[in-house]
Image (cartoon, grey):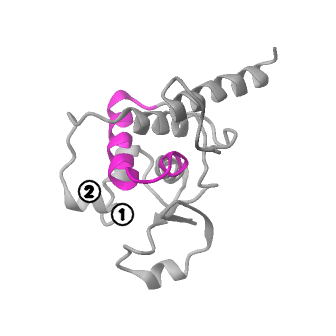
Amino acid sequence: MKLDQLWWVVLALILFQAVTGGGGEASVRIEVGRPSQGAYRATPAERHLLGWITYWEARGEPFEGQVAVAAVVLNRVRHPDFPNTIREVIFQRGQFQPVAERAYDPTMPIPENIQRAVDLALAGHDPSMGALFFYNPRLTRNPSFWASRPVVRQIGNHVFTR
């Protein structure tokens, strides 16, 4: 079996586990796409921080949307207009509502589904298709800002933009 084929088998098993919890049939179709970016090697602290922001931003969203939210953070890390670490991107002033609303808790347990989403994003999966921003149109406080951004796609309640 070629490495590329093996990758897809492993990904299929991970997704089946994520959707069914390890048993039964999948009732949801998840498309996280092929790896579109190189893998990002995160420290345990960065992995936890990415899980924390993904939880608070996307806890009620579909699994694909959770992967996309984590991917947006990583897209920013790679983009020259943003800081180049997960920590600096997340704590950049005015960027993520959960940072303004609550203190980061490094002891908060990250739910398993959120950690799986983070792990897929860290492995290079990007269902946001390279987006640098996301927002919920029903909750945004600045609709005129978002109206000027090119929409890449919508997943659940989040609109992903560049």
Q: Nearer the viewer, residue 36 or 155?
A: 155
User: At which x and y percent is residue 41?
Assistant: 49, 30
> Magenta segment range?
42-68
Q: Locate residue 68 relative to residue 87 in the image: left or right.
A: right
Q: Secondary structure at mark 2?
A: helix
Rendered location of residue 108, percent (x, y) = 22, 37
Residue 40 showing in the rendered view:
no
The amino acid marked with disc number 1 is Gln
Give the residue at x 54% y 54%: 79
Quick check: 151 above or below 39? below
Residue 147: image location, x then y, percent: 53, 82
| 58 relative position to 155: left or right | left
Q: Which mark is residue 99?
A: 2
**Which mark, residue 95?**
1
**Would you call the spot at circle 2 few (<14 residues within 10 Å), some (14-19), or many (20 or more)?**
some
Q: Amino acid at mark 2?
A: Val
Answer yes or no: do the residues labelled 2 and 1 have beta carbons within 8 Å?
Answer: yes
Residue at (50, 50) in percent of width and height: 62
The Cα–Cα distance between marks 2 and 1, rounded to whole angstroms, is: 8 Å
Q: Residue at x 28, y 57 (%)?
A: 98
The C terminus lies in quadrant: bottom right
Q: Residue furthest right?
A: 1
Residues 64 and 53: in front is 64
Q: Is residue 44 magenta?
A: yes
Position of residue 101 relative to residue 116, above or below, is: below
Tag 1, which secondary structure? loop
> Which disc number belongs to residue 79?
none
Instruction: Say if residue 17 shows up in the picture.
Output: yes
* Residue at the extreme front: 24
